[in-house]
Image (cartoon, coloured by chain):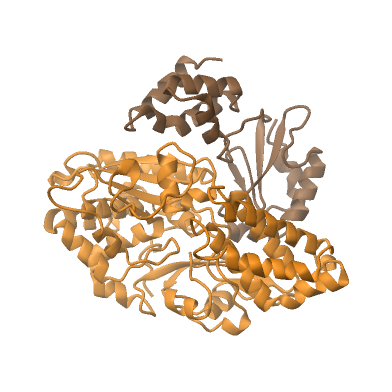
Chain colours: A orange, B brown
Amino acid sequence: MERPLTQHIDPNGSPLSLAAYEQVGGYAAVRKALKGMTPQEVQKLVQDSNLKGRGGAGFNTGMKWSFVPMGNGVPQVRYLIANADEMEPGTFKDRVLLEGNPHQLIEGMILAGYAIQANISYVFLRWAYRKAAQVIRKSIDEAYAAGYLGKNILGSGYNLDMHLHTGVGRYMCGEETALLNALEGKRATPRAKPPFPQVSGLFGKPTIVNNVETFCCVPHIVNNGADWFKGLSHSEDGGTKLYGVSGKVKRPGCWELPMGVTMRELIEEHAGGMQDGVQLKGVLPGGASTDFLTAEHLDIKMDFASVAAAGSRLGTGTMIVMDDATCPVGFVHNLQHFFAQESCGWCTPCREGLPWVEKILLSLEKGEGSEADMELLHMHAQFLGPGHTFCALAPGAMEPLQSALKYFREDFEKHIHEKRCPYANHQ
Amino acid sequence: MSLTENEIQSIDHEIALVPYKKAAVIEALKIVQQHRGWVSDESVEAIAGYLEMSPAEVDSVATFYNLIFRKPVGRHVILLCDSISCYVMGYKELYSALSKKISIKFGETTPDKRFTLLPNCCLGCCDHAPAFMIDEDLYQDVKEGELEEILNKYA
């Protein structure tokens, strides 16, 4: 089984240096593309590989790049940004790539930058990733010194500068347009679309923002071709995927596996199954903003279409397992606390609705809830859902809530009828 | 308090990377906080003056971000992850133990200014929950019995 993204990462070792990366074929793709391919050929190759964005939305990466205006008579300043904010609770996959093989990210960014003819790039990294910050800063310097960044890269005539920007903590920064505002020195509130960032992004110029894992796939696609990439997968979506499992499993962790492995394989085989004494009750398959699935869904494939068909989202592919000793109401309360706190306040439904939801869940946990609260929760799940808010934060927050109301309704009702948390003794 | 030469030098470096001065405001706040530990009203005014912004404009940015401190903090800041994987793996118990040990709650600073304790959303090490950071050091799979030894590293 091929693991192109992680095969050279030593889980307990140092990050791959430039020399070590070159020794295993690193930067060969940059040489190949900059010397023998046009930007359009790189775009087309990535589009044909069916690489879908690994940040959660799952849009075809090459197609996204193709929306950048190219040629004469269009803005010549273009930006490229790696979204390394990774602040969604339960999500920890990009950390592995950032800390383990930083040059793979840089190489992917050079190729993407070349494909859209961007000359300035940023790595937008969350503050908490201190080790990654050190590693990326050092690797960017190494890449400049070796002629992979800067002016006239490898004599090709192509120029690309790269800067590291570390955030100061706000989940909204992971939203594409809010990230642009943060980079411009503003509050990270989302922007109206259209215009899309591909046309008018950072400082009003065409901009591409991609997830770290997405960029890391690109050198391998350029080296080995679109068909090879598609062949790595067990599903229609191309490539491998970094999957993660956290919660009360025997071996929580992160693994690179063919896109489309089953949830059962991930939880039972790779994560070693549930810890002794607890059973699986629910799973958020792709981070805090995805709908719960349950044990009956264990055999679904973990790819974008299959998880959607089961009523949830693949998201970041890092699943959070809820066991039967953990209170679902407390679990969802924790999630809503996070979303309420991280709402940027830009639009009223999100700013006002999420704290309301949080308060209702807290009162349920304390045994002070009533049947009317269930109606209120259902109402919020609908009115904070897609189409009612400015961006996807509140609809994302409603995914675990609405599915918890569907699958764990009995638990909510027990809190109301018993006037206490029935799980209190188990925690 | 006006900006020091060192701070101005670092802020100028950031201004050179962006198309207009204002765009460097987050970096300026980070730089001032790095030197002074937190961002006071006087610091906000100094940054505003230097970047040709109003103090309210600078403050609107400073108060938006979780890790810009608008109140004084202790010598060491503890960021305890309160997100879902840590919640499942016993963050509440860890918080109780930690809070008891240093006798402060979230948002407070010890009387000797040694520690400030803050909640922090997901630290991105969900497979090693529960976790916290002290200054720039990450502690994972933390057990209550290890707290004493960890805290002793920070005077």
Q: Residue drawn 52% across and 43% down? A: A127
Q: Position of residue B106 (x, y in %)?
A: 73, 42
Q: Residue drawn 60% across and 23% down? A: B41
Q: Position of residue A63 (x, y in %)?
A: 27, 64
- Horizontal side, residue A295 vs residue A152: left or right: right
Q: Quadrant of residue A349?
A: bottom right
- Horizontal side, residue A322 vs residue B63: left or right: right
Q: Quadrant of the N terminus of chain A?
A: bottom left
Q: Position of residue A392 (x, y in %)?
A: 50, 59
Which one is in front, B79 or A30? B79
**From the viewer's perspective, is residue B117 above or below residue A1?**
above
Asked if residue A134 can be seen in this view, the reply is no
**From the viewer's perspective, is residue A299 above or below residue A93?**
below
**From the viewer's perspective, is residue A386 above or below residue A112?**
below
- Horizontal side, residue B86 vs residue A14: left or right: right
Asked if residue B94 can be seen in this view, the reply is yes
- Horizontal side, residue A58 vs residue A73: left or right: right
Q: Quadrant of the C terminus of chain A?
A: bottom right
Q: Quadrant of residue A385?
A: bottom right
**From the viewer's perspective, is residue A310 above or below residue A361?**
below
